[in-house]
Amino acid sequence: MAKKAPTKSAKQAPARSDAAKLLSGDNPQIAKGYGEAPVKAYIAAIPGWKQDVAKRIDALVARAVPGVKKAVKWNSPLYGVEEGLYFLSFHMFTNYVKVAFHNGAELRPPPPGVSKHKRVRYLDIRRDDAFDEAQFVSWVKQASALPGEKM
């Protein structure tokens, strides 16, 4: 008996891509949301070496601040002690990951990157940068004890 050609309905549908759209600098476009799920979706959508940096940041913050509140707004993960008040966020750029400490000018020592906003300080992490986890955790703990920024 001759084999029948598959019918249209039996053919496999083209694979649907559920991947997040990447904006400039490989920053994922993720819908605004609160909690662990949107942050995990954001991190999962980051390509290449920056995903490893984002996973490390997320794990260090979660370890340093038990019960930390997480959200994604403006295509950036946010971390706070109270929902709606955040002390840290990060964002992908072409050649680095920019971590923003919203009251970073009060941290000792302050993170190296200055901002046009008086209180904000940045830490830019490039592909081959050494990452001082102890200093980062110290900043996170200090920042979490300061008033959060309403976002």
Image (cartoon, rainbow, N blue to C red):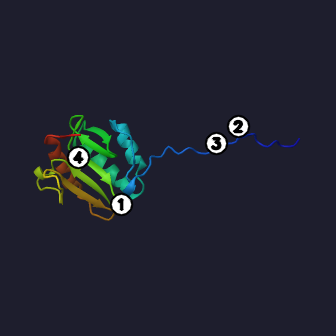
Q: Please name the residue that numbered disc 1 is placed on.
A: 94
- Looking at marks 4 and 1 on the same chain, the residue that comes earlier in the sequence is marked by 4
Q: Please name the residue that numbered disc 2 is placed on.
A: 9
**What whole-number distance in Å separates the C-alpha atoms at marks 2 and 3?**
9 Å
> Do the residues under discs 1 and 2 have CB atoms within 8 angstroms?
no
Q: Nearer the viewer, mark 4 or mark 1?
A: 1
**Mark drawn on residue 13:** 3
**What whole-number distance in Å separates the C-alpha atoms at marks 4 and 2?**
50 Å
* Kind of residue indicated by mark 3: Ala
**What whole-number distance in Å separates the C-alpha atoms at marks 3 and 1?**
34 Å
> Do the residues under discs 3 and 1 have CB atoms within 8 angstroms?
no
- Looking at marks 1 and 2 on the same chain, the residue that comes earlier in the sequence is marked by 2
**What whole-number distance in Å separates the C-alpha atoms at marks 3 and 4?**
42 Å
> Do the residues under discs 2 and 3 have CB atoms within 8 angstroms?
no
Q: Please name the residue that numbered disc 4 is placed on.
A: 88
Q: Nearer the viewer, residue 135 or 93?
A: 93
Q: Give the percent coordinates (x, y) of residue 129.
A: 28, 64
Q: Give the percent coordinates (x, y) of residue 57.
A: 29, 50
